[in-house]
């Protein structure tokens, strides 16, 4: 059996979901018999591949770059997994929604800066007015809640997705299942 191509992506999140993914420890070696990680902050790939079997996405959509990226990922992925509460609900990044991006930028780059107060206009992507979960931009196949999802949850879910077994833990929802 050929290995499934898996990507993991980091949008607006704290990387805690990726840390929990790594907490699968030696179980990653078992999964490595079944999957190839073709794109991820954990591997040295710069471009999202043309065709991915399973894409796990951490973080919410907070910037114009995030929006472009999630649409690109959806277009090139057979299955999209919202990985963790930021991707599923907006969670922590969406706490800025009632304030608007201007006050956040002012606080970070002007009020709290002791030198060179300046709101960046290059390199840092433009923030969207509100932070939204990824299903508000693209179809999501699987929601994997938790902040972060536990390593056991990752292992159970990935094993099921890779082997085609049903997802049978209650916290997981698969559209169409
Ligand atoms: Fe971090 Fe929790 Fe968001 Fe995952 S769900 S990126 S652990 S804040």
Image (spheres, rainbow, N blue to C red):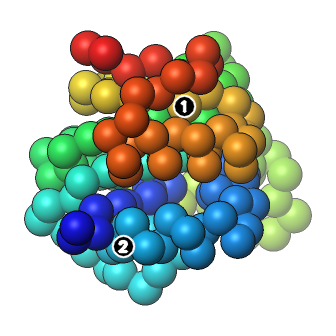
Q: Is residue 144 visible?
A: yes
The local secondary structure at tag 2 comes to strand
- Which tag is nearer the camera, tag 2 or tag 1? 2
The answer to whether the residue bearing label 1 lies less than 8 angstroms from the nearest atom of ligand 1 is no
- The crowd level at tag 1 (other Cα within 10 Å; few <14, some 14-19, many 20+) is many
Q: Which residue is mark 2?
A: 36
Give the residue number, with chain letter if any, for mark 1.
144
x 12%, y 65%: residue = 50
Is 140 or 29 nearer to us in this picture? 29
Check residue 50 in the rendering and tell me which mark sits there, or answer none. none
Reading the chain from its start, which is encountered first: label 2 or label 1?
Answer: 2
72 above or below 116? above
Which image quarter is the N terminus in? bottom left
Q: Mark 2: give few (<14), some (14-19) or many (20+) Cα within 10 Å.
A: some
**Is residue 14 among the parts visible in the rendering?**
no
Between 53 and 19, the one lying in front of the other is: 53
């Amino acid at each position: 059996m050929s290995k499934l191509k898996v990507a993991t992506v980091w949008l607006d999140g704290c990387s805690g979901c990726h840390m929990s993914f790594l907490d699968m420890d030696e179980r990653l070696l078992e999964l490595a018999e079944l999957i190839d990680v073709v794109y991820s902050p954990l591997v040295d790939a710069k471009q999202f591949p043309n065709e991915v079997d399973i894409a796990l996405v951490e973080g919410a959509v907070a910037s114009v770059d995030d929006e472009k990226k999630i649409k690109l990922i959806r277009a090139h992925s057979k299955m999209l997994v919202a990985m963790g509460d930021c991707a599923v609900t907006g969670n922590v990044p969406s706490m800025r929604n009632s304030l608007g991006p201007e006050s956040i930028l002012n606080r970070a780059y002007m009020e709290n800066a002791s030198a060179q107060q300046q709101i960046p206009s290059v390199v840092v992507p433009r923030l969207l007015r509100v932070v939204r979960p990824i299903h508000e931009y693209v179809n999501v196949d699987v929601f994997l809640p938790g902040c972060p999802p536990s390593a056991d949850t990752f292992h159970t879910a990935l094993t099921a997705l890779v082997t085609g077994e049903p997802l049978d833990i209650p916290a997981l929802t698969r559209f169409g299942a």
